[in-house]
Image: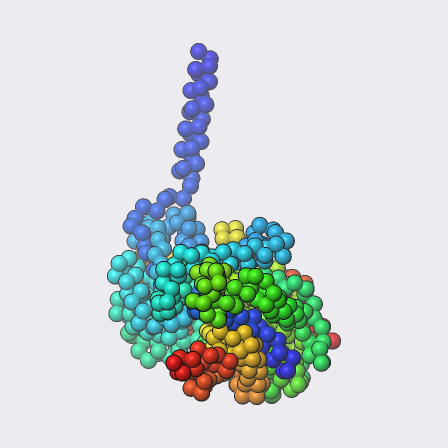
Amino acid sequence: MLVYGFINSVILALIALGFSITFGISRVANFSHGGFYILGGVLTWCFLMKLGLPYFLAAGLAILIVGLIGLLMYKVLLVRLRGLELSEVITTFSVGIVILELLRSLGIMGFEYRTPVFIDESVEIFGVGLGIQRIIIVGAGAVLLVALHIFVHHTRIGLAFRGVAQEEHTSLSVGINPDRISMLSLALGSMICALAAVLILPLGVISVDEGYDILIKALAVCIIGGLESTLGVLVASFIIGYIEAFTSMYISSSLISVVPLASMLAILLIRPSGLFGKSKEIEERV
Amino acid sequence: MLKRSLKCLVLVIVFFFVGAHLSLAAPAPKGAPIIIGVPSSFKSIEAAEGLKAITLATEQINAMGGVKVGGEMRPFKVESIETRDMEPGVQIAEALLAIEKLILEKKPNVIIQGPTRSEVLLAAMDIFAQYKIPSINNAVASKFVEVYKSNPEKYRHCFRMFDGKYVVQYMGKTMNKIGSNKKAYIVVQDAIWAVGIANGMNAWFKNNGWEVTGFDKYPTGASDFSSTLIKAKQSGAQVIFAIFDMPQSGVLVQQWKDMKVPAVFAGFISPLMGEKAWTTFGPKIEGVLNIAFDGGNLPLHKYQPAKTFYDAYIKRWKEMQCGHKPAVDYDAVYAMKMAIEKAGSLDPDKIAKELENLSMVGCTGRIHFADHQYVFGVDPNVDAISAVYQWKKGKRVPVFPDSIAEGIIEKPESMK
């Protein structure tokens, strides 16, 4: 249970990371996250199964396309709504629904839409049988975190990301274009979301309905951890992941979908900004 | 001159050939079409494939001249409407509105398949009764028979194909053939129809000297089943009985294999149903026992009508992914045809009467009703049948009932 709890926590972190990064930098709550996730999976499947492209090329293309859609969503829709938070939420939510329902109407249903696992083997860890794909997910999650750390601390554009995240208006004074950075953050968040889909979806089957669940999971993790905090996302993922595992093992597996939402409500009552979030605290101080 | 004569001769031959061909072909149905209404939730793969089977049956019947109604040949015409009742958040009332819209606008003479969700069918029975439309419905776990029996006169036009109770009967008999230590672990999707079947199976296990070491329900969308598999392994269960139709349930089977749980995996797992499941999931599904609710959804070599239907379906639609709806829906069209022809009219009361007395060979077996419900048994020459099969080296091998079995149940590698 400890092993699977750990893996499920990493899966949750991967699902939520894209949402958190986008919000942390641009303050846009990207409610089309679930749509982008499923789109990433469907595109990979199409490139792989229909066009016969090699797996990594198919996945790479899918990630790029989803990133481009995220970028365009900002450029075409969100840039006109900057600062109108409710409108941003409604717009991104609508985009997500359009993507999901469009995929549904295009016939993405049934059980054949499945991307294969990278390596179809299993191993034993601490006496527990485990598919290699789950180990790859953990490894990829770790690599992604390191890569993100290097990106935001040691590259010009990464530093610009941090600048905008810390103080958008001040960043203008040092020549950073916040709109451009926000646009890129949407693209980056969408690409991470699609990467999560490429890694996680081989464990199951691509289902349009899962897009809605993914959004709820990402929201729960981000709200518990603090919407803009990457560390918060990690901690919250492990909290939810292990609570889910314990609930399923010792209480009732039928409650596992309630766990993230109940945890979210509890955290909202105690710390409205989440465990590592600052926004509400600052607001209260002002 | 010779050239002109030759041309005339060729024209005459062609004329006679075409004329003779046309006169020998089945007469094209000429009367007003008989409307088959199909109100269902077509975003569910079962309903969508069921509609395809209905279309196939009507195409075949129309090609053979149509339906004879009082001396006139009339074609079938399918009119479907999306009820969305299987989509999350859709209220029963919304689905009923769609059904009523179909009835008022398209004026169907008969209804086939009907809504997918059990509670929607129960509510729709009142609408079918109100408009007096003969219907053969297909929601699995509803209390259809109870409702019918509560007022047989009112619901005399309503019929149903499959009932979840048959899954319990079939899987119970299959359990006895496995040769395990009589310890089972039940894992089920938290949906009314699935829990209903699982509860029935739980009772069966207990009444037949089995020990049920655990009973877990998972919400739709769950994608990690490790806790159940760990508990099943620890409890020594040698049968894992699963009922799922959500796409993620394929994960359960993969984890079963990855975690090397020494137990036979049996039940109804939708994603593993179709021929393509082997391509989708690979050898990890080897050894899984799955039940096709309608036997005709498998190309049964020991029951030719099933094979004929399956082959015709594949020829027309390329693939079949599900184990429920296509075969019984296909049979329902032929059942309606027979009932209408025997009634000699489209009078709903007469059609209902003929359906009550119906006995015909279908791809699911011999179709006849008791309490307005298809009767399922173990011999397709006597009753309709389900089919339990086992995945073996990429093939679906029927293992129960014996009348159609092509192999015996083999234990998975982890139990040897």
Residue at the outermost top position: B1
B6 relative to B237 in the view: left or right: left
Q: Position of residue B102 (x, y in %)?
A: 30, 61
User: In the image, what residue occupies the spot 59% across and 57% down?
Assistant: A60
| Residue A13 seen in this snapshot | yes
User: In the image, what residue occupies the spot 31% across and 69% down?
Assistant: B94
Q: Position of residue B337 (x, y in %)?
A: 38, 57
| Residue B411 seen in this snapshot | no
Q: Position of residue A115 (x, y in %)?
A: 59, 61
User: In the image, what residue occupies the spot 66% across and 82% down?
Assistant: B233
**Is residue A195 depicted above or below B410 in this figure?**
above
Q: B44 or B22, which is in the foreground?
A: B44
Quadrant in the picture for residue B230:
bottom right
The quadrant the N terminus of chain B occupies is top left
User: In the image, what residue occupies the spot 44% across and 16% down?
Assistant: B5
The quadrant the C terminus of chain B occupies is bottom right
**Is residue B66 depicted above or below B132 in this figure?**
above
